[in-house]
Image (spheres, helix red, strand yellow):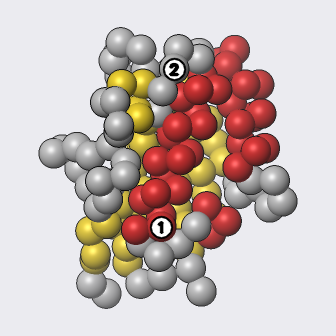
Amino acid sequence: MPKEVISTPEAPESSMYSQAVKVGNTIYVAGTTGVDVTTGEFAGPTVKDQARQSLLNCQAILRAAGAELSDAVMVHTLLLRPEDADGLAEVFDQFFPDVRPPRCVSKIGVDRPGLLVSIAMVAVTD
């Protein structure tokens, strides 16, 4: 099955990896940070600020692939501080009010000043 690289200027881009790859009706979204593409900076100093922007970035990537957040079937979140889990959950509730996809949370393993959260996901369209 052919792989289609998904890219949108509405989300942060990297020369090191694709924003997403679509194979058939499955979309694999790379770990996406809370960088606001209009400023090039993190959306704010809190995990809520950055998680909200990260999910908006994931949403933009999914839309570029012909999908929506509601198509997510798995979410993997990387957090810098475990104590931010409650704030992260509040933001997820706003973006996934009905069907919450399964998710796992791990500790961020890279040291990037200001980075509090990164979100990757898998989505499936009909």
Dot 1 surroundings within 10 Å: few (below 14), some, or many (20 or more)?
Answer: some
Dot 2 surroundings within 10 Å: few (below 14), some, or many (20 or more)?
Answer: some
| Residue 90 falls in image quadrant | top right
Q: What residue type is labelled 2?
A: Gly
Q: Which residue is drawn at 46% across and 47% down?
A: 57
Q: Which amino acid does label 1 sit on?
A: Arg
Q: In the displayed structure, does residue 19 sit left or right of residue 29?
A: left
Relative height, residue 17 to residue 73 (above, below) = above
Residue 107 visible in rendering: no
What residue sits right under mark 1 in the picture?
63
Q: What element carries label 1?
A: helix
Q: In the displayed structure, does residue 122 sit left or right of residue 86?
A: left
What residue sits right under mark 2 in the picture?
44
Rendered location of residue 79, percent (x, y): 55, 26
Q: Give the Cα distance between marks 2 and 1.
A: 24 Å
Relative height, residue 13 to residue 62 (above, below) = above
